[in-house]
Every structure is written in C-alpha cells, then in structure tokens.
C-alpha cells in the first residue's frame, strides 16, 4: 500500500514538470519567431511592432500576422514610404499608430481598414453621404417613381448579400399588403411569426419581402439558407419566390416545403440555389396554413421564420470581406501557393458553410478584409489572395416599377387558378386593392386589365367582402380609362388611397381566347380505297382545298388506324397492316402521322404534310381494316351547350342527358363515343352511367372524370361497357358542378357527335322513341343572366 502511494505521487510530479517545460518551450519559440520576422531597429511583440522611425522594408512585414505598427517619429504625410506602409496595412487590416504633419497641421495615422478606405468603391467612408442611385453611372434609377418610399425599399441601395436573425429584428423585411391575405408579425426572441385562426379562408397566405438585392458582376447564382419551424399545427407550407420590382412584374418560384405534424418536416433547415432572371431582385417568403378545410376545433398553431441568409455564389470576384467567395484561386497576392485547409486548424467541422475545399482562398471567420489562406512558408500566418473586388452590374431597368405604369396583379387563394382573383395595383410605393366596382368599371377597363396581366383580353368582375379588415383600397370610380386608351398603363388613377373596414373588393376573371376554330376543324375527309369490302382498304385523304392523296406507312400503327376508323364512323380498327393489291395509288398527302389513340379525328393528331420521298420508304400506302358493328351505330346529329355560373355558395348543381331506351346486340360490347368541350372556370365532374329498366333507381357508373381545367378544344371520351346487359337500359351523362372554395365559377360545357355502338333503339311503352333524339333534363336551370 505504501509503495502504491509513492508511485502515485511520483507520476503527478512528472506530469507537472512536463507541463512547465512545454509552456517554456512555447514562449521561447514565439520569441525566436518574432525576432526572425522583426524589422531591424524595431522591437516586436506577439501582435505589435514598435519602431522609432519608418524604414523602406517596414511595409514588407505587414503580412507577417501583426495587428498594430506604432511609429514614434513624426513624418511628412506625403512620404512615399509612409504611403506604401498605409496601403499595405489597409490590405491586411493592420492598424498604424502615430502622427504625420502637413501644411495644415498634424494628422493621426490611426487607420482602421474598413472605416476609412476611399479606394474601395464598395466601402463608404464614415460620415460620408450615402451615394444616390440617380447619380450612379449605371443609372439604375431613372425617374422619381423609384425615389418614393416603397414597401420594396426601392429607394435604398441594393445589397450583394443579406443575413437576418429574425429573433433580434425584422432586418428591413416588409409585410406585403393587398396581394396576400394574412400578415407576418415580428416577435422579439422568436422571429417572424404567422399565426392564423380558423376564421380565415382556406388557401389564405402571407408574404414578406426582403431588402433589395443585386448580383455582383460575373455572378449568376445565389444561395439561400433558411431556418424555420412550426408548432401545434397539423399542416403548414413555406415557399420562396423571386421578384424583380425594378424591371418586371414576373415572379419566379424557387422552392416550397410542406411541414406536417409528426414528420421530420416540423423543423426546416435547408439550402436553396437559384439563378435570378434579372440582376436586381428581392426574395419573397410565403407562409400558408391549412390547404384542407379546417374545423373549428382544429388548432392552426404558428409558423416561425427564424433565420435566413442570402448570398451570391462568387467565383471570379468577391464582395464585402470575401466571406462568400467560392472561386478557385489558390495563390497569395505575392504568388505563394496556399496549403490545404485540412492541414490547418480551420476544418470543415468548425466552418461547415465556408466551403473549405482543397487549398482555395477563403475567409471563413471574416478575420480579414478579403479572402486569404495559409502558406508553407508561414503556416500560422494569414496571407491575403490576389482577387479583385466585385462591382455593381450595369443593369437595364424600366422607367417604372414592375416595368409599367399602373402595374396590376391578380392574386387568388392558394391552389386556385391564377387567371382569377383579387385585382390590385401598385401606387405610391404599395400594392392597393380596388374596391366598390358596381357601375364603376366599364367593359373596356376590365378588358384592359386582363390584357395587362397577360391572361387574355376579355374579363368579368364580381365583388366580395374584404378578406381582411383595415385594408386600404382604391375606389373603382376614380379609375378613368377612355375608349381611346389601348392599355391600362395609359389609364388615370386620380383617387387617394382610402381605408375601408368592411368594403367590397374587385375580383377579376380573365379568359384566354379559345384555340378551337370551326373553320379549321375537319381539314381531312377520309375514306377507304376498297375492292370488295367497304371497311377494308388503303386510307384515302381529301383536304378541304381539293387535294387528294394517301398516308405513308412510315410510323403507321394501330393507334393511328383506330383514329382513322373512328373518324369514318366505325367503332375501332381490327388491323393496320391489311394486304392490298398493287395499283396506282395517289401520291402521299400525309408523310407522317402520330396519334395517341383517343382522338376522334386525325385533325387532333400530329401530322406532317411535307412532300418528300425520304418520308415514304414504301410505295404502298397505309391501310386499315375497320370493325363493323353488329348493327348500325346510334348517332346523334345534334349538339348540346350548357352554360352555368355558380354564385358564392357550395350547392351542388347537376345537369343530365338521358338517352332513349336501348337494347344490347348479343355478342358485342357496347361502345359510347362523344366529343366534349369545356371553357371558363370549371369545377365539377362528368360521369357516364346506365340504369336498367326494371331498376331505374340505381345508377351503374361506367366512367367518371374531374373537370377542373378548360379543354379549350374538343376532346373525345371513348368508353367500352364491360357488362353484358340482358335487359333494356338507358344511358345518362351527368355534369356535376359546384362553387370552388367560395369563388364564383362560370363555365361552358358542350357535347357533340355522340355515338353508341352495338345497340338498337326500342319502343318506350306505347310510343316509339325517335332515333335521333335525347331528353335534356336540367335539374338546375341554366343561368343566362350572370350575377355577382
């Protein structure tokens, strides 16, 4: 036991002695190194040089890692040696202490690098007036429209980079109005917070916009690092967008993230990369709760935006202190090669965002005024690199914000069509909605609004109560657009911006012109050049201008043959490679055709009519064998058009087409074909079903399709009934429509060229149903007088 204590004390004493010797060795090493790198006749400490006077070689010691140089002698301020020293000290962030004299008196040499540099165009002297865009050589601001106070801070100088910890302050991020529906609120020590409740409409969102940003010269991409979170909510979404207030009304979508309770997305830490369309831009962050319909008992919680950093991906120059430089320069200003970062104390673990790749120059800790690196000659001293400073680009901006006078924006609730929504205009630096539209907006004004938004040349308006209280609006009666005006930018807005609490806002719907043209439909008439059977032969094409020809076999397949047969009235094609005798066929009129199989005519296929023998590898034309139904198909030569506009409610409205009573031909499946056309703002469903005569209360649904987008041209619905119907039945085509999330919907629905194959029409009781008749039952009367 005594021996154990003796060895224990001996080990402790040895460890203490080893620590003391190691400490003394470090002090001696530092003193030796300092003496080696100390200028003659000067005394050097760990971070400071003290010299009685200036020498020619003193400037070369600035890069050796010293922080201060003190000179006791008073020199002339224009001494070349002093100017050389001050220039080197400015590059390496070294403070020069002392005084110099001029004819006007003494001057202090103390020179903090980042405060007094007059040669760096990106660094402003302390106390100097902020430069004005109006006097800038690239003339980014051309008129007084940019000088007024704006929610986009257009009067401020744009930044190359921006970082904000929202827990401390909003950092000049502004809440947008009139083009969103909710508000972000800043909460100290928390961040920007979005906290709605169940009273807000589904799809309502809130937007905040960053200070103005600009890409440095020779830089095309930016990096966005974001940190956000949400609490006590079942669903939230945060998205990022780019806007260009100085150039265009265009808005780019960068990325969006869905945050849901119980998943890994309740906290968002991510990095985005994006290339702006214009050098001058701003970032918009959009927060959204509850795309689904909320219940009163459901708690929305809150969405928090905690931190965001926007930085340029600089590869050929650097801005600021070079913290975001990501180029490939690996030499110091004096030509020394840089060492790899992994051989230093600056590792990727300590600086994960600094991109410490290979031996490239970086400024991971922002310790110097420009990118730097270590070298083999001075492994412990930072050496700055020879990289040029980024400059402001020579941007070409519009005379007016967003590219035009009186810019407009249609903004709808999230998830709805972008060509319908609340209409707002940018005036006096802010977006303002338009209110009180009754008897104030002429059809001319409404159409000019649609033209300016780019969603068509014709529109309709309605009004609805303001979604938020205390919003500002412009009264519609003070918008003057004479008939002679050709664009909304030529109109005059003379009204002041008024506060309305329970006003009615203008909602606008624009309609794009239809691509369907009856004059160009039916360009090709088809027939079969047959020998014995009418349904077999080469396909003969006749154009409306009298040209006659065939179709090349190159690319000819069964899908195209199906479309050809259906256009001629047959149910489908049996074969597309039918053998035909050699004879003198007309020259090819269609050199290639590409059909997907569901088209009702070849007009809807991709057709090439270039007359070239290179497209036709065979002298034989395309052929087809078409299916002959057991009986002549039932064909309806009439067409039906249904027009409807739903008011602001959720009532479902149904309209039905009911067929005569049919009986199935034995051994053949029933086929239903018809063309349909949808335009406007549809929201509903079309379904085809049948009812057996003995059980007319039960619907057997065969096919159902949602209608949420306009077709803008006729499309074909082709259905084959798998069931064998052994008794009489009737078909029903049902159109169900409903107002879309409290937004008025108006649409046109048309049915044409309806055919039913392999059926026969039978009598209905004592009376026989006419062959070419359908009974139109409209459960809700078509609304011809549109109302708001």
Image (cartoon, rainbow, N blue to C red):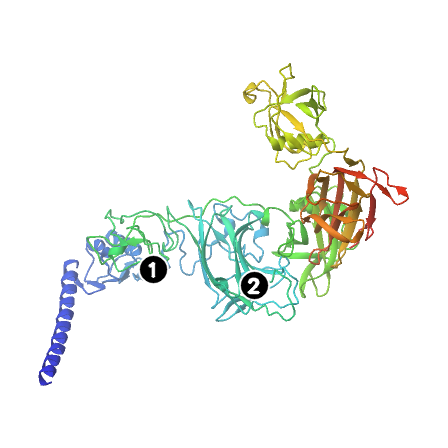
Circle 2 — which element?
Answer: strand
Which residue position holds label 2?
A: 235
Q: Which residue is mark 1?
A: 351
Q: Quadrant of residue 496?
A: bottom right
Q: Front-most of 613 and 179?
A: 613
Q: Tell me the SS state at disc 1.
A: loop
Q: Which mark is residue 243?
A: none
Task: Report the side of 494 relative to 14 (left or right).
Answer: right
Q: Position of residue 122 (x, y in %)?
A: 41, 53
Quadrant into which the C terminus falls: bottom right
Find the distance from the CA under tag 2 to the CA under tag 1. Answer: 34 Å
For the point 65% across and 31% down, the residue is 574
Determine if residue 481 is in view: no
From this view, report whether residue 479 is shown above or below residue 112.
above
- Neighbour class for label 1 at 10 Å: few (<14), some, many (≥20)? few
Residue mark closest to the camera, 2 vs 1: 2
Q: Residue at coordinates 78% horizontally, 45% vertically from top-left? A: 727
Q: In the image, residue 216 lies at what x, y percent?
A: 43, 48
Specify the quadrant of the image occupied by residue 111: bottom left
Residue at the (61%, 63%) spot, across then down: 182
Q: Position of residue 588 (x, y in %)?
A: 62, 20
Vertical position of residue 273 compared to residue 96: above or below: above
Lower position in the chain sequence, tag 2 or tag 1: 2
- 180 or 519: which is nearer to us? 519
> Furthest-bottom residue in view?
2
């Amino acid at each position: 036991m005594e021996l154990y204590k003796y060895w224990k004390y001996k080990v402790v004493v040895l460890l203490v002695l080893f620590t003391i010797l190691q400490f003394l060795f470090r002090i001696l090493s530092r003193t030796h190194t300092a003496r080696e790198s100390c200028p003659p006749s000067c005394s050097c400490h760990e971070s400071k040089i003290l010299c009685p006077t200036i020498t020619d070689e003193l400037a070369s010691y600035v890069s050796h890692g010293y922080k201060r140089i003190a000179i006791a002698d008073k020199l002339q301020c224009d001494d070349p040696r002093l100017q050389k020293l001050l220039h080197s000290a400015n590059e390496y962030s070294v403070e020069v202490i002392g005084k110099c004299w001029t004819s006007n008196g003494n001057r202090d040499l103390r020179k903090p690098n980042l405060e007094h540099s007059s040669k760096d165009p990106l660094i402003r002297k302390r106390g100097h007036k902020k430069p004005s865009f109006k006097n800038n050589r690239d003339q980014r601001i051309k008129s007084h429209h940019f000088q007024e106070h704006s929610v986009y801070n257009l009067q401020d100088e744009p930044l190359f980079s921006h970082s904000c910890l929202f827990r401390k302050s909003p950092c000049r991020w502004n809440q947008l109005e009139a083009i969103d529906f909710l508000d972000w609120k800043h909460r100290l020590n928390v961040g920007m917070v979005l906290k709605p409740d169940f009273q807000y409409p589904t799809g309502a969102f809130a937007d905040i916009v960053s200070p103005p940003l600009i890409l440095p010269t020779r830089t095309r991409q930016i990096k966005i690092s974001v940190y956000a979170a949400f609490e006590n909510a079942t669903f939230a979404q945060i998205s990022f967008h780019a806007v260009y207030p100085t150039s265009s009304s265009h808005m780019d979508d960068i990325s969006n993230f869905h945050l849901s309770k119980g998943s890994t997305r309740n906290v968002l830490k991510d990095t985005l990369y994006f290339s702006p369309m214009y050098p001058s831009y701003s970032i918009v962050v959009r927060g959204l709760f509850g795309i689904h319909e909320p219940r009163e008992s459901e708690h929305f919680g809150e969405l928090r935006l905690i931190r965001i950093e926007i930085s340029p991906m600089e590869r050929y120059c650097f801005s600021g202190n070079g913290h975001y430089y990501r180029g490939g320069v690996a030499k110091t200003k004096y030509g020394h090669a840089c060492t790899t970062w992994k051989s230093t104390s600056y590792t990727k673990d300590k600086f994960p965002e600094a991109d410490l790749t290979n031996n490239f120059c970086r400024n991971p800790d922002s310790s110097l005024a420009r990118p730097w690196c270590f070298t083999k000659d001075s492994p412990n001293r930072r050496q700055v690199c020879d990289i040029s400073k980024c400059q402001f680009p020579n941007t070409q901006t519009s005379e007016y914000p967003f590219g035009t006078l009186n810019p407009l924006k249609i903004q709808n609730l999230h998830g709805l069509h972008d060509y319908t929504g609340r209409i707002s205009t940018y005036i006096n630096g802010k977006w303002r909605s338009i209110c009180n539209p009754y008897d104030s907006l002429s059809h001319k004004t409404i159409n000019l609004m649609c033209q300016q938004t780019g969603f068509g040349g014709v529109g309709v308006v309605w009004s609805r109560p303001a979604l938020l209280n205390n919003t500002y609006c412009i009264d519609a009666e003070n918008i003057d657009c004479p008939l002679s005006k050709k664009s909304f930018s030529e109109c005059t807005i003379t009204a002041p911006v008024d506060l309305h609490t329970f006003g009615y806002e203008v909602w606008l719907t624009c309609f794009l012109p239809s691509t369907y043209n009856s004059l160009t439909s039916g360009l090709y008439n088809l027939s079969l050049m047959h020998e014995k059977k009418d349904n077999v032969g080469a396909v003969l094409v006749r154009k409306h201008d009298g040209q006659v020809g065939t179709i090349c076999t190159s690319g000819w397949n069964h899908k195209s043959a199906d479309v050809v047969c259906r256009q001629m009235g047959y149910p489908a094609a049996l074969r597309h490679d039918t053998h035909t005798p050699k004879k003198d066929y007309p020259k090819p009129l269609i050199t290639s055709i590409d059909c997907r199989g569901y088209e009702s005519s070849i007009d809807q296929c991709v057709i090439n009519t270039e007359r070239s023998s290179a497209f036709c590898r065979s002298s034989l034309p395309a052929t087809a064998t078409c299916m002959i139904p057991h009986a002549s198909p039932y064909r309806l030569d009439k067409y039906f058009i249904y027009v409807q506009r739903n008011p602001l409610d959720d009532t479902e409205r149904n309209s039905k087409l009911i067929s005569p009573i049919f009986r199935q031909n034995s051994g053949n499946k029933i086929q239903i074909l018809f063309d349909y056309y949808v335009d406007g703002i549809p929201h509903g469903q079309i379904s085809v079903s049948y009812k057996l005569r003995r059980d007319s209360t039960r619907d057997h649904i065969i096919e159902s399709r949602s209608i949420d987008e306009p077709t803008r041209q006729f499309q074909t619905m082709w259905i084959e009934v798998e069931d064998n119907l052994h008794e009489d039945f009737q078909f029903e085509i049902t159109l169900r429509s409903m107002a879309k999330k409290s937004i008025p919907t108006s649409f046109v629905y048309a049915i044409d060229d309806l055919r039913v194959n392999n059926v026969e029409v039978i009598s209905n009781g004592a009376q026989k149903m006419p062959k070419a008749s359908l009974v139109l039952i409209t459960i809700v009367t078509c609304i011809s007088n549109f109302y708001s």
